[in-house]
Image (tube, rainbow, N blue to C red):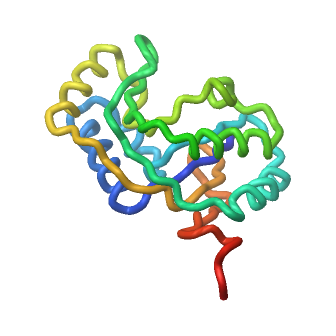
Amino acid sequence: MAYAVSLLFNAEMADAVSARWQRLADAGFSRSMVDLGYHPHLTLAVYDELAVEAASAALDRVFDNVERIPVTLTGFSTFGAGSGVCYAALASSPDLVRLHATIVTAIGETCRPHYQAGRWTPHCTLATGMTDVEIDHARNLLAKDWRSLAGTFEMADLVEFAPVAGIKRWPLALTPRSTRTS
């Protein structure tokens, strides 16, 4: 089993991403994300081994005062020939990059190389396990009606996978918790 820390989109964004997952599945390119049985998300870090209780406590502290983060999916891309992955690219977000670095540091364990600070590419996976030819066809299919999607990340998740099993979830604040009144 592996572990992941993810951010979950607001409902409208999640529905739009799910529709793209289904479009790729219906076209016969990849059912990977539909079959995953997990919400549309952005993965912040993946760990092959994790001290779950300690990580959960560290994430409690991190997410105690994290506000919802605006997000825009600007287009789609791949990780290059042979990667098998098609993903929605995110607009640059210094807040997201800072949160990623904070999480990796707070957990303090070694995450997979592509999720380490300075090496991480923020993305929302649309499909995996495709050949380069399938990726080209999938890109053409998605390009027909692609438009940028704007929304927010509303929740954070710590999960074990595969299959995906939730460990703990944190709602992101509408406003900073330190300035809220009762």
Image side of residue 157 versus residue 127, left or right: right
Determine the residue positioned at 20% across, 31% down.
143
Where residue 101 sits: x, y (%)? 69, 39
* Percent of width and height locating residue 65: 68, 63
Q: Horizontal and vertical percent for residue 45?
A: 65, 39
Q: Quadrant of residue 9?
A: bottom left
Q: Which residue is the extreme one toward the left?
A: 144
Q: Residue at x 71, y 71 (%)?
A: 178
Q: Is residue 1 above or below residue 117?
A: below
Coordinates of residue 48 in the picture (x, y in percent): 72, 34
* Residue occupying image coordinates x 37% and y 23%: 130
Write down the quadrant of residue 28 in the picture.
top left
Which residue is at 40% across, 22% downward? Answer: 78
Image: 37 above or below 86: below
Q: Please tell me which residue lies in front, 67 or 156.
A: 67
Pick the front one: 16 or 63: 63
| Picture layout, residue 148 above or below residue 56 | above
Determine the residue located farthest toward the top in the rendered image. 81
Quarter holding the N terminus is top right
How many numbered dots are placed on residues in this image? 0
Residue most toward the front? 179
The quadrant of the picture occupied by the C terminus is: bottom right
**Residue 109 vs residue 112: left or right?**
right
Compared with 133, 157 (above or below) is below
Q: Is residue 151 left or right of residue 173?
A: left
Residue projecting furthest to the bottom: 182
Residue 175, quarter of the rendered image: bottom right
Q: Nearer the viewer, residue 168 or 96?
A: 96
